[in-house]
């Protein structure tokens, strides 16, 4: 029962949404700011809308795909679109209750995302989807605590970006055969497998080194995250069973909840 519920949450990207909220709460606590519940709701809803729109598009573009997520989105397309529109309408009034600086930052990020989506096919040779998503994801989370505290922590941004990029790259690495079968482009389908594996291990090593040199609660979290991803590459046979890599990989973004009372 629990396994089925978790699979359903994965299909609907609810695990991603929960992870975003936990990460935002974690970094706001470290930066000692309180953005208000409206910001948490807006970020969670926006992430779900973006991921759902992306999955609906992919499901339509690959009608022959048998992946559970895309089959679900094709089957329930009309229902998901109705929920999408209702949620979009529902969160719109919240925009008037968030700090102006957060609204302006979110607007800039939305414009950047829209422009990228328009020229995604042309940029795919030079800018992988994983790189773009990692950048937007990191900016979307850290702009709230950084804007409200008027401080910029380069190491926190760099580490979150690296952690997210490695997460997405590992998923592409595991799902290379499926992506090729469905006609999807990913960093794994564009790069040599050996070079990609070496690149991931290099990025993980950089992340571990930076985290180790700056020991505090934030960097302890990053050290744990990069360590987990290292094990996922070294023991790919084990983590590949029953798509365990998905649960563990996205579970890294839930780890900060363990630091809530530290």
Image (spheres, rainbow, N blue to C red):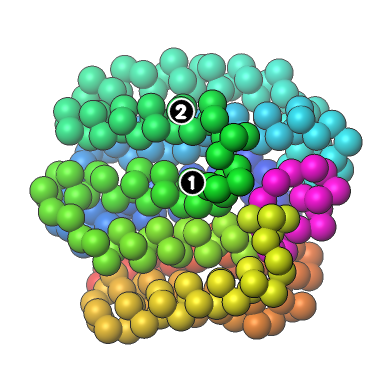
Residue 178 highlighted magenta (yes or no): yes
| Place of residue 165 in the rendered image (x, y in percent of width and height, measured from the top left) | 50, 59
Residue 188 highlighted magenta (yes or no): no
The reply to whether residue 244 is in sight is no
| Place of residue 140 in the rendered image (x, y in percent of width and height, measured from the top left) | 35, 43
Instruction: Locate residue 55 relative to residue 253 in the image: left or right.
Output: right
| Place of residue 105 in the rendered image (x, y in percent of width and height, measured from the top left) | 26, 34
Q: Which mark is residue 248?
A: none
Q: Residue at x 25, y 29 (%)?
A: 103
Instruction: Locate residue 142 relative to residue 196 in the image: left or right.
Output: left
Q: Which mark is residue 132?
A: 1
- Residue bounds of the magenta highlight: 172-186
Mark 2 — residue? 115
The residue nearer to you, when weighing 3 against 217, is: 217
- Vertical placement of 138 versus 159: above or below? above
Say how many tags the image has: 2
């Amino acid at each position: 029962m629990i396994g089925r519920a978790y699979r359903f949450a994965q299909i609907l990207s609810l695990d991603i949404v929960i992870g975003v909220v936990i990460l935002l709460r974690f970094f706001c606590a470290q930066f000692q700011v309180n953005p208000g519940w409206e910001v948490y709701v807006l970020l969670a809803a926006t992430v779900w809308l973006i991921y759902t729109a992306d999955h609906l598009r992919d499901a339509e573009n690959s009608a022959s795909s048998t992946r559970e997520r895309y089959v679900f989105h094709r089957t329930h397309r009309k229902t998901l679109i109705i929920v999408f529109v209702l949620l979009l309408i529902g969160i719109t009034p919240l925009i008037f209750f968030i700090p102006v600086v957060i609204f302006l930052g979110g607007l800039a990020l939305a414009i950047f995302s829209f422009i990228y989506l328009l020229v995604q096919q042309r940029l795919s040779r030079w800018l992988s989807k994983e790189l773009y998503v990692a950048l937007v994801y990191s900016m979307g989370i850290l702009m709230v605590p950084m804007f409200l505290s008027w401080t910029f922590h380069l190491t926190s941004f760099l580490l979150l970006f690296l952690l997210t990029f490695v997460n997405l790259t590992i998923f592409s690495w595991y799902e290379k055969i499926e992506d090729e079968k469905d006609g999807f482009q990913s960093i794994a389908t564009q790069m040599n497998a050996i070079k990609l594996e070496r690149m991931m291990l290099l990025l993980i090593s950089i992340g571990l080194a930076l985290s180790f040199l700056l020991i505090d609660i934030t960097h302890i979290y990053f050290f744990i995250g990069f360590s987990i991803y290292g094990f996922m590459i070294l023991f790919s046979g084990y983590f590949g069973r029953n798509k365990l890599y998905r649960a563990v990989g996205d579970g890294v973004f839930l780890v900060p909840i363990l630091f809530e009372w530290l």
